[in-house]
Image: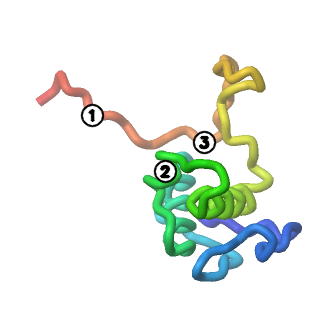
Amino acid sequence: MKFTLHRDANSDAYWNGAKPLPADIHVSSYDTFMAEWELLSILCSLHGHLTAFDVLTGADKGTEKDQDMDAVMNALQMYLYPRMPLSRYGPNDKRVKNVVVGVTSRVVPIDPSTD
């Protein structure tokens, strides 16, 4: 799957990573949700300081980690645009019941009842 950097915003305005952002990033995952996670991991690697685990654990406001997280999350949005929003929650943080997913996940969970 290929993600293209949306060029309307100057990446220098929000990117503070060790390596510049490429125009395109290719990921190996065919599943949309896994591809987005892989994209996040690649952006963290390009940044050079942040990991996906750091994004999950969060940061205190105004710290270097917070600024780095903002840079990576802004870059993620610039690659995912115009497919936003990604969330399946409404403005009041309640689950959206009528979710139409354009891509069906090919990942089939293993049934533990079969040997």
> Which residue bears the numbered disc 2?
34
Q: Is residue 67 left or right of residue 13?
A: left
Residue 73 image-quadrant placement: bottom right
The structure residue drawn at horizontal position 64% and vertical position 20%, both measured from the top left corner, is: 95
Residue at the far left in the pictured view: 115
**Residue 24: image location, x then y, percent:** 66, 74
Q: Which mark is residue 110?
A: 1
Q: Is residue 94 visible?
A: yes
Q: Which circle, 3 or 2, is nearer the viewer?
A: 2
Q: CA distance from mark 1 to mark 3?
A: 20 Å
> Which residue bears the numbered disc 3?
103
The structure residue drawn at horizontal position 62% and vertical position 66%, both measured from the top left corner, is: 2
Amino acid found under the numbered disc labelled 2:
Met
Q: Earlier in the sequence, mark 3 or mark 2?
A: 2
Q: Secondary structure at mark 2?
A: helix
Residue 87 image-quadrant placement: top right
The structure residue drawn at horizontal position 74% and vertical position 25%, both measured from the top left corner, is: 90
Amino acid found under the numbered disc labelled 3:
Val
Q: Earlier in the sequence, mark 1 or mark 3?
A: 3
Q: Is residue 55 left or right of residue 14?
A: left
Q: Nearer the viewer, residue 112 or 91?
A: 91
Q: Is residue 30 visible?
A: no
Q: CA distance from mark 3 to mark 2?
A: 12 Å
**Residue 20: image location, x then y, percent:** 65, 81
Counting the numbered discs, the total is: 3
| Quadrant that contains the C terminus | top left
Q: Secondary structure at mark 3?
A: loop
Could you classify mark 2 by the number of other residues whose Cα lies within 10 Å: few (under 14), some (14-19), or many (20 or more)? some
Disc 1 to disc 3: CB gap under 8 Å: no
Q: Which circle, 2 or 1, is nearer the viewer?
A: 2
Q: Secondary structure at mark 1?
A: loop
